[in-house]
Image (cartoon, rainbow, N blue to C red):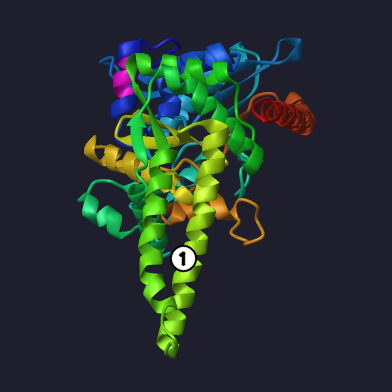
Amino acid sequence: MKFITDVEKEKYEKFVSTHPLKSHFLQSYAWGEFSRVKKNMTPHYVGLVDEKGNLKATALLLEKKLPLGYTYLYSPRGFVIDFYDHELVAKFTEHIKAFAKERKAIFVKIDPDLIWKEYNNKDEEVKLDKNPEEVFTNLKKLGYVHQGFTKNFETMQPRYTFRIDLDRPFEEIEQNFSKTVKQRIKKGTSLGTEVLIGNENDIETFSHLMDLTEDRKDFVSHDLDYYQKLYEIYNRDNRMTLFLGIINTEKVIKQYKKEQEEVESKLKPLLDRESLSNANQRKVKELEGRIKKLDEYIEEYQDAQNKYGQTITLNAHMIMEYGDKAWTLYAGNHNVLVSSQSNYKVYYEHIKYCHEMGYKYYDHFGTIGDLNKDNPRYGLHIFKKAFGGNYIEFIGEFDLVINKPMYWLFKNMVPAYRKLRLNMSKRKLKRSLKDEDRETE
């Protein structure tokens, strides 16, 4: 077999996008181009071909420059290969090693979305078609160093996710939604949440909502240019769809006021009576409670309208579409009118969209493995679980070490540097949002 260091784009894309086992947008040609522009990483599209020139394996290798001329290579969710063909993996690894040495790489990192364990929505373990321990053993034998069975978001890509099987009637998918999800979708619908597909002109709104979400959820988002370039580059040859959840505050206020009038009309004849039975006393209390709640809703929407206007985009979700799958890569949500449940309505619509597009899987793109209720991301986990997908644990990260002394130095020094940059980014965002609040007051 022959190793190719620059696979032609059309040939590469055809192989990756249609691969029956390893198709993933993070291995797409577009992701490599985006990484060149916004991540300061050089993409290499390498492959292995047989005697007839047919591709048997490929990898997007992202090269990151380091001091003193060193580099490292990262293949996100790579390689695109049948990992159960141990002989093929060994041959590809041999060539990858040689290529990495030429690039003065300290190591090559991979994190294949190979399923280690899977549970259905009833928390029952699903029997896998093949035993992933075979792959685990073979990779270690070839010199790959496993980075551990991490439980949170310590790795480059999430080790856990929820995936919804879309290859069935949509009614069956809906049945697996939790009762709470169904109720909140219904409320979002009843309040007239409008779900639209946005375009490049909506990226600024999306970026702002991501900043608001970052401030609440304690994660690091990106700047506006990052999202604009991602949308531009990925939509050249593939599809990234931006879903917007929009509320008309004036319509909702009128709707709540109308309901309030209806409740008051039911309450008045009861209050006019000289005496009430116990049942009617409970009814009065119930109706008065509803009026009070409606007052709170009306005030909430009026306050939001005064600050942001009559039409407010509350949600903007970015869906990546590639091969036979779709991923919710980013979801930005406003910090007002959360009671509208518009977020659930938007999720419902893009799951339905992905089903109609004929994708096989819808991936929530990340959750946790540490299910302690004190985990700050436990709420995120419960939210995603409520949509009824299967809970999946991937095999994890492996580093193919090329230079052992430099690898030790990298592993011990880089985490401290990244933590420092993370804290600086969070402080910068908080200052920015505070300044914005002052401008809108």
Q: Residue at x 50, y 27 (%)?
A: 206
Query: For residue 411, what is the image quadrant?
Result: top right
Mark 1 lies on residue: 290
Local SS, label 1: helix
Count of numbered circles on the image: 1
Observer able to see residue 349? yes
Identify the image quadrant of the C terminus: top right
Q: Residue at x 43, y 57 (%)?
A: 386
Query: For residue 415, what is the image quadrant?
Result: top right
Decide: is 161 above or below 208.
below
Decide: is 146 above or below 5.
below
Q: Is residue 252 magenta?
A: no
Question: Foreground residue, 20 or 231?
Answer: 231
Magenta-tinted stretch:
11-15
Q: Main secondary structure of the magenta part?
A: helix
Q: Position of residue 276 (x, y in %)?
A: 43, 87
Q: Position of residue 171 (x, y in %)?
A: 22, 54
Decide: is 326 above or below 286.
above
Question: Foreground residue, 276 or 87?
Answer: 276
Q: Position of residue 427 (x, y in %)?
A: 76, 31
